[in-house]
């Protein structure tokens, strides 16, 4: 009897064989390096794989995932990924993609004790507090959850714009930051049409004054 984790190893062998059958040089090409145009900041949810839902191939999207696709200014993991994507890989687009039915967002809307995760969910609770007037006016719980998913993405897009990494890139070249939401029920991505691509889009208090080099 094959153990569950062994299925993954066998699946890998099958996948690699299929790729080589279609293109004998497939892995040789990948081994030469990566030049993705996109950085994807998504949720850790196993149902939202970036390449699969966008129909892209390996090497096309640089990916960072965490619970509820949050951009926190003290998260060195995310900031390291962002720096590498922007400064080394020179991606042209940074995409924050949330998804409806997000467990992290739903949990943040309650007063339940979620153990260590409480510390992370506080970031989403702060989004709720900021938009509480709008959210509390939505009587349907599901609609309120969906709207918080959208507002959370919008806030994370703006959080990216507040980073020195993104602002320095804007000063030198074109870099666009987008906010999307994936629909679990239909498989479609919704563009929230929130795009930050220059420092003037930010509140002045968050704009860095860079000294001339």
Image: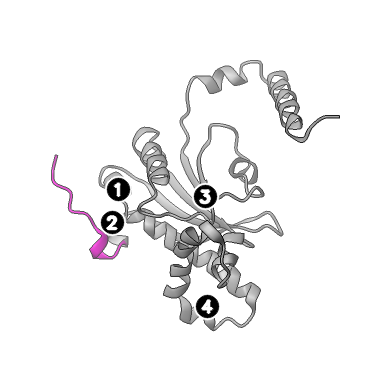
- Determine whether 25 is above or below 7 in the image: above
Q: Which residue is mark 2?
A: 199
Q: Which residues are magenta?
A: 202-213
Q: Nearer the viewer, mark 2 or mark 3?
A: 3
**Secondary structure found at label 4:** helix
Q: Where's the C terminus, which quadrant?
A: top left
Which residue is at 69% across, 23% downward?
Answer: 16
Q: Which of marks 3 and 4 precedes in the sequence?
A: 3
Q: Nearer the viewer, mark 4 or mark 2?
A: 4
The prevailing secondary structure element of the residues shown in magenta is loop
Give the left or right position of residue 132, taking residue 2 as reference: left
Q: Nearer the viewer, residue 194 or 64?
A: 64
Q: Which residue is mark 3?
A: 66
Q: Which residue is mark 4?
A: 135
Q: Which of marks 3 and 1 precedes in the sequence?
A: 3
Q: Which residue is mark 1?
A: 170
Q: Nearer the viewer, mark 4 or mark 1?
A: 4
**Around disc 4, counting alpha carbons within 10 Å, would you say few (fewer than 14), some (14 to 19), or many (20 or more)?**
many
The residues bearing labels 2 and 3 have C-alpha atoms spaced at a distance of 26 Å
**Around disc 3, counting alpha carbons within 10 Å, would you say few (fewer than 14), some (14 to 19), or many (20 or more)?**
some
**Secondary structure found at label 2:** helix
**Around disc 1, counting alpha carbons within 10 Å, would you say few (fewer than 14), some (14 to 19), or many (20 or more)?**
some
């Amino acid at each position: 009897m094959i153990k569950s984790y062994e299925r993954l190893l066998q699946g890998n062998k099958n996948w690699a064989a299929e790729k080589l059958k279609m293109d004998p040089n497939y892995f040789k090409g990948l081994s030469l390096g990566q030049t993705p145009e996109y950085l994807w900041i998504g949720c850790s949810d196993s149902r939202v794989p970036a390449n699969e839902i966008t129909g892209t191939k390996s090497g096309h999207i640089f990916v960072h995932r965490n619970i509820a696709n949050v951009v926190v200014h003290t998260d060195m993991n995310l900031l390291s990924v962002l720096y590498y994507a922007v400064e080394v890989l020179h991606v042209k687009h940074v995409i924050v993609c949330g998804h409806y039915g997000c467990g992290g967002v739903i949990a943040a809307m309650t007063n339940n004790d979620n153990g260590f995760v409480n510390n992370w969910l506080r970031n989403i609770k702060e989004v709720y507090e900021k938009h509480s007037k709008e959210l509390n006016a939505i009587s349907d719980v599901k609609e309120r959850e969906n709207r918080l998913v959208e507002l959370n993405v919008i806030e994370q897009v703006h959080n990216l714009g507040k980073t020195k990494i993104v602002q320095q890139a804007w000063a030198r070249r074109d870099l666009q930051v987008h906010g999307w939401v994936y629909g679990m029920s239909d498989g479609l991505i919704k563009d929230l049409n929130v795009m930050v691509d220059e420092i003037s889009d930010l509140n002045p208090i968050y704009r860095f004054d860079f000294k001339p080099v």
